[in-house]
Image: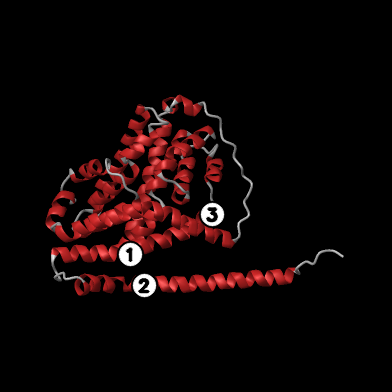
Amino acid sequence: MGPETTPPIQNGGKINKIMALNFLMGAAGVYLWWSVYRALPDFASWLTYGLLPIKQGSHLGSSVEFFLYDTPKVMMLLFLVVFGVGILRSFFTPEKTRAFLSGKSEFAGNILAALLGIVTPFCSCSAVPLFIGFVTAGVPLGVTFSFLIAAPMVNEIALGLLYGLLGWKVAAIYMGTGLFIAISAGWIIGRLKLEGHIEDWVTQTDAPAINMEEEKLTWNDRIVYGWDAVKEIIGKVWIYVILGIAVGAGIHGFVPEGIMASIMGKDSWWSVPLSVLIGIPMYSNAAGIIPVVEALLGKGAALGTVLAFMMSVIALSLPEMVILRKVLKPKLIAVFIGVVACGILSVGYLFNMII
């Protein structure tokens, strides 16, 4: 007599019950998240002026209220965005991305690479292994750069936080201009034929094997993937978020609006290149710099100037250039900085003129 087996109908019923339970728990979680999120302004005001002995309307009070409001707000938005995109990322892997881009023609490849950069896991520390994997797999140099520019600059965390803090128009403008810079800069670098300025040891590295076997993941697996993404990413960026909010709180409370408008306003031609030069030596990610952007815009800084500042911090940071020096010769790094900086300056001047 063979072993007993569970009839398929019973297995299907169990799966449906689990899915229904997950759906109910998810709906309850979203409702709780939204209820807490809506209560944050009143809670921050009560903490600042009710619990703490701070005078309402003072510079200190304005800064403290900004910090106590933005800290939980940004962390809650970050949690939601990272969890949702973590589930989305379970459908992508760096290996699949590399295989998909391998052999693609330029321009079409630049567009696809920039779009894939939005949803593909990436950080500065992974720039070197990703670059090696792409180049040795036959992905054109310009296409590789389109991905490396878009992934840190136009990622889902930046777009989600910009949407939550500043609205869909600013998020859409940032996404459109960021993709434009990634696509055009990658295409230009590809046209310059600078493959000879990759470090020799990179081109001599054997192409890694690409395993395209589809991994079977259930929705429970993907939810776990989302939770793991939350723990990994927020665990890495929370300190930058707190520091960024602290800087933004100081600007919000103590910097007069007229001073910020005169330094980063649209009427000063030098404000855009100055913001780029200030941004390059800084090291932060999108989650850490966006609270500063929020405070700058609130104090009268021009949108184009602020976008240029944010893009330079994320896409042209000095630490990332040091990391890329391991695989690129100085001339190619200089070309990369020059092309991307020109794109960022163009975006800054364009939006200062039209908005």
* Residue found 40% across the figure and 42% down from its top: 124
Q: Nearer the viewer, mark 1 or mark 3?
A: 1
Q: Disc 1 versus disc 3: distance between alpha carbons?
A: 27 Å
> Is the C-beta separation of discs 1 and 3 under 8 Å?
no
Q: Amino acid at mark 3?
A: Ser
> Is the C-beta separation of discs 2 and 1 under 8 Å?
yes
Q: Disc 3 versus disc 2: distance between alpha carbons?
A: 28 Å
If you read the primary sequence from the N terminus, does the residue marked by circle 3 or circle 2 appear first?
A: 2
- The quadrant the C terminus occupies is bottom left
* Residue found 56% across the figure and 45% down from its top: 96
202 vs 263, nearest the viewer:
202
The image quadrant of residue 324 is top left
Q: Which residue is mark 2?
A: 36
The tag on residue 119 is none
Q: Is residue 150 visible?
A: yes
Secondary structure of the residue carrying numbered label 3: loop
59 vs 132, nearest the viewer:
59
If you read the primary sequence from the N terminus, does the residue marked by circle 2 or circle 1 appear first?
A: 2
16 vs 141, nearest the viewer:
16
Q: Residues within 10 Å of mark 2 (few under 14, many from 20)?
A: some
Q: Which residue is mark 3?
A: 90
